[in-house]
Image: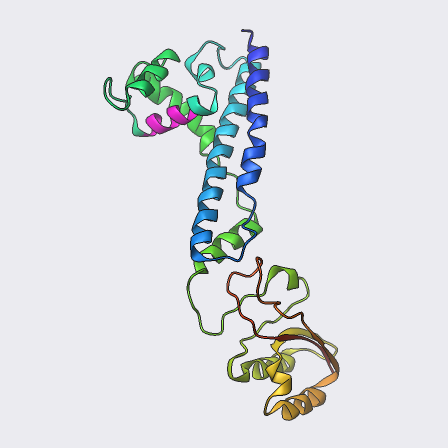
């Protein structure tokens, strides 16, 4: 097969992998638990592995078109998802599989591609690893998701992170226990310059329980104006929340004098 035709076929196979990669990167739509978090992390790792194989296939296609690889060489002959997975697995180990036993089939398929010695295996792996290990930089969203997964299952007193549907609206989400949110709000207001605005999520209890009258008096003294908006019941539950609570919450917008 001519290099251009083989490159086109390899690139088309790489493109077909995209749907599987995208499907594995869809975040969990159910209420997050430690088990579901582990399952999601496993799916994301699979997506990264497939994306690395896809990069290899596209790199091989480019090299064929540029004349840097022979279409009948061992790397080009290994340019399928299964073939590259085999090359990566045994290339990392630096030695061919055993000639008999459980891994004999892998050895036979590597040999069919022209990889019949440890030296050839290592040479092919060194070429492929340039693409396989070239992991793209994580986006801020990906890094945040990974950090969130590390916290799922841990009970941290007062820690109920802001659900995603409530964010680009929230500057402050203080703890609600023992009406700590009142103290946090008043302290934050003291740090603002004249004309500054505070947007905060508070517990409904801050406005309904003992001491709420004093809290509102303190707000009136500190602010030019303020207003509140009750948040929907269940705002801290649902699939976008990895630590859930049924507590009612109120959005506060305050402008200081």
Residue 163 screen position, x and y as percent: 59, 63
Please, is residue 39 above or below residue 73 in the view? below
- Residues in magenta, as a range: 84-92
Left or right, 18 with reference to 133: right
Specify the quadrant of the image occupied by residue 150: bottom left
**How many tags in the picture?**
0
Residue 234 screen position, x and y as percent: 61, 68
Q: Quadrant of the N terminus?
A: top right
What is the chief secondary structure element of the magenta stretch? Answer: helix
Left or right, 228 with reference to 161: right
Left or right, 94 with reference to 253: left
Front in this rendered view, residue 118 or 243: 243
Left or right, 86 with reference to 233: left
Q: Is residue 167 visible?
A: no
Residue 93 screen position, x and y as percent: 30, 29
Front in this rendered view, residue 174 or 203: 203
Q: Quadrant of the C terminus?
A: bottom right
């Amino acid at each position: 097969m001519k290099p251009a035709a083989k490159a086109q076929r390899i690139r088309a196979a790489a493109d077909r992998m995209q749907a599987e990669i995208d499907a594995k990167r869809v975040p969990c739509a159910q209420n997050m638990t430690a088990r579901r978090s582990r399952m999601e992390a496993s799916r994301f790792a699979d997506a990264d592995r497939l994306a690395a194989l896809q990069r290899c296939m596209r790199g091989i296609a480019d090299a064929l078109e540029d004349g840097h690889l022979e279409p009948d060489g061992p790397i080009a002959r290994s340019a399928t998802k299964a073939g590259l997975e085999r090359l990566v697995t045994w290339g990392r180990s630096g030695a061919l599989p055993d000639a008999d036993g459980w891994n004999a089939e892998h050895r036979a398929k590597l040999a069919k591609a022209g990889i019949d010695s440890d030296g050839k295996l290592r040479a092919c792996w060194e070429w492929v690893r340039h693409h396989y290990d070239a992991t793209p930089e994580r986006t801020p969203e990906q890094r945040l998701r990974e950090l969130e997964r590390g916290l799922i299952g841990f009970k941290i007193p007062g820690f109920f992170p802001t659900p995603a549907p409530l964010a680009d609206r929230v500057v402050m989400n203080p703890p609600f226990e023992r009406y700590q949110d009142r103290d946090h709000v008043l302290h934050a207001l003291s740090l603002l310059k004249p004309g500054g605005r505070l947007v905060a999520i508070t517990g409904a209890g801050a406005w309904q329980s003992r001491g709420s009258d004093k809290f509102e008096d303190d707000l009136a003294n500190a602010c030019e104006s303020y207003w509140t908006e009750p948040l929907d019941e269940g705002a801290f539950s649902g699939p976008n929340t990895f630590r859930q609570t049924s507590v009612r919450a109120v959005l506060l917008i305050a402008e200081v004098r």
